[in-house]
Amino acid sequence: MRFGDLLEFAWRVLRGYPTRTLLILLAMGIGVAAVVAVTSLGEGARLYVVNQFGSLGTNLVIVLPGRSETSGAMPGVLVGKTPRDLTLEDALALMRSHAVRRIAPLVVGAADVHVGARIRETPVLGSTADLMDIRHMEVALGRFLPQADPRQILPVCVIGAKVATELFGARAALGEWLRIGDRRFRIVGIMAKQGESMGFNTDEIVIVPLAAAQALFNTEALFRVLVEAKSREQIAYARDDVEEIIRLRHEGERDVTVITQDAVLATFDRILRALTLAVGGIAAISLAVAGILIMNVMLIAVTQRRREIGLLKALGATAAQIRMAFLTEAVLLAIGGAGLGLAVGELARNLAVQLYPAIPFQSPWWALIAAPATAVITSVLFTLAPARRAARLDPVQALSRR
């Protein structure tokens, strides 16, 4: 029996039992679709985190007050256990490092912003002119904060696109005055629409000079300091220099946490890749269930097709050819189910993209290969026992139904 004959024979058998064939295709398709859809979610989450961290800037080193080792797993500033404030003088001292290109100290708070009778509570960010280059921000109209001494209180601000729309409507906002708390600021720039980045929507913020923010919120402490290294190769040197400079300024105490963008990104990447593999493996269990269904159906088929098997053996078909006929049938079912599953999984991925366009849902290449391959291997493995039983049938007994 040639390979073409085996394919034709298996195809006729599948067409002869449409209900059975459809059920197996559904079971196998659901398993493959589950693997593709679930791994798409995991890979989408991983790519989303990568993109979000990429939007923060390049060659970035972040300095936070407090040591993560002494406060559980988070810097002390986040849990109210900061041993020493991070000050503007500390931030300016970091420029002594030859590995540091620029810095952007940050003060963050929330305040009511007034324009005439209109008012809204808005996050207020205090920083310097270098923030725009470090964070890769864009200004749609006007300019960013002016280059000036960060200790100087300047009554200027840059507002997000959504803030401009809500407070000024169709009116031009550039050059107008607004009030934040008890202080007035002239709008010198309007940010381009950039949306949300790491849970922070730049379209809804107001950016003021650092000293103005410190006076507004009555604080000398910095929320954090963004440091840009001169190159990717200089990131490690910049991190070490930052830790040493702050240690010397803080009387030998290592009371800041210095994290690099690459280190955080690598950690998230490892976690999300492992998570994707885990959930993909869990989804693949459904393929084992489909394989058990195929085995049960094939065992029943051996009983139902005894006369057919006996006739084939009486005409000269060998035991190996009988086994191959059953295995070919299983492979065809697996390929059909895998194709159906890939199509359904792609539809589910497209639906997820429509619902959550910000997340780049995408099936990893290994899942697109592993899911169909697992379906075929599972089908073959679970068909071996029924195929061996069919091959051992005696043709005389099979034809006489004994």
Image: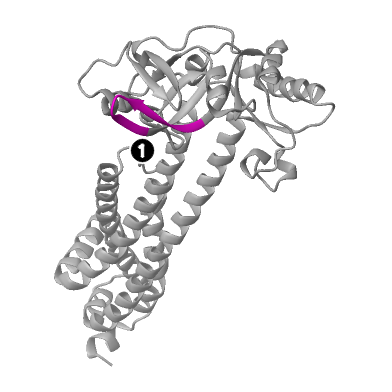
Q: Is residue 114 above or below residue 320?
A: above
In the image, 335: left or right of 109? left
Residue 32 position by quadrant: bottom left
Residue 387, percent from left and from top: 36, 72
Locate the N terminus by quadrant.
bottom left
Q: Is residue 355 above or below residue 55?
A: below
Residue range (magenta): 109-120
10 Å neighbourhood of mark 1: few (<14), some, or many (≥20)? some
Helix, strand or loop at label 1? It is loop
Residue 401 in view (yes/no): yes
Give me the residue at 25% from left, 42% from top.
354
Residue 301 position by quadrant: bottom left
200, 26: nearer the viewer: 200
Inspect the magenta stretch and tell me whether residue 262 lies in it.
Answer: no
In the image, 92: left or right of 155? right
Kindly identify which residue carries mark 1. 360
Locate the C terminus by quadrant.
bottom left
Q: Is residue 96 above or below residue 79?
A: above
Give me the residue at 67% from left, 46% from top.
73
Residue 57 in view (yes/no): no
